[in-house]
Image (cartoon, helix red, strand yellow):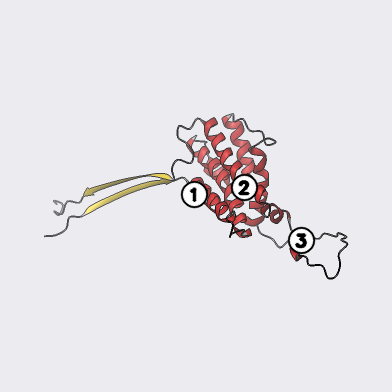
Amino acid sequence: MAKKKYRIEARSTTNTYTWCQTAAREALRQAERPDGDCFCLSMMAVVFAAFMVEGFLNHMAMEKNIKGWDIIERKMSPRDKMQYLQQVLGLSIDMGKPPFQSFSQMQAVSDALAHAKTVETETIEEHAISINDEWAVEEYWPMPRWMQTCRSASAVRCMVDDAEAIVRSLSEQAGFKWPPFGAFGIASFEASEIDPRPPKV
């Protein structure tokens, strides 16, 4: 007996910012493990925290049907997007107060890594040390700003926490019904049997 044939129609909407939140939180968890302390994981946590916020800004604009957003957003920085949506939607945002005050810092790290360049950094300091003293080279190693930020465990955790708080604040102000991190997306699936008989001529 021949198997029945079906036409499958499936659609899905993926909340990309939620995947970024999951990646940021998991990278932070791994970085804070007693046997972890991996600098690269701290980098990932900060970058995905920045991606999370920008992703939600795009999500919010789509849900609010901002006209022409798919075109104009390509020309704007994440900060520009936030300011634009603040004006259009009447959002209450104070970049000088928590949680929004962390946004510029996480974005600076994200930009430095997304548009990576070789950076020359120099510091000149005087230290009174004996030639026989034991000291770590890292203590005197000049680091660019993004590296300094990612080496601070408290700063990294603060940025991930604040990124989530920014998204929750914007979601509430936008009047969204569901919690912003409640789902990774939605999907629909339909199957219809194909008539095996040849069409009549």
Amino acid type of the residue that numbered disc 1 sits on in the rendered structure? Trp
User: Alpha-carbon neighbours of circle 1 within 10 Å: few (<14), some, or many (≥20)?
Assistant: some
Residue 198's tag is none
On screen, residue 105 above or below 67: below
Using the image as rendered, state which of residue 99 and residue 187 is in the foreground: 99
Amino acid type shown at disc 2? Arg
Q: Disc 1 designates what residue? A: 19
Quarter of the image where one finds residue 71: top right
Type of amino acid under label 3 = Glu
Contact flag, marks 2 and 1 (Cβ < 8 Å): no
Q: Residue at x 82, y 67 (%)?
A: 133
> For the point 69% across and 56% down, which residue is it?
147
Category of crowding for the residue at label 2, using alpha-carbon neighbours closer than 10 angstroms: few (below 14), some (14–19), many (at least 20)? many
> SS at mark 1?
helix
Image location of residue 171, percent across then percent down: 52, 35
The answer for how far apart the CA atoms under marks 3 and 2 are is 22 Å
Which residue is found at the position 56% from the left and 31% from the top? 89
In this orientation, which residue lies closer to the viewer: 20 or 72? 20
Q: Position of residue 60 (x, y in %)?
A: 52, 38
Q: Say whether residue 199 is left or right of residue 91.
A: left
Residue to which mark 2 is pinned: 157
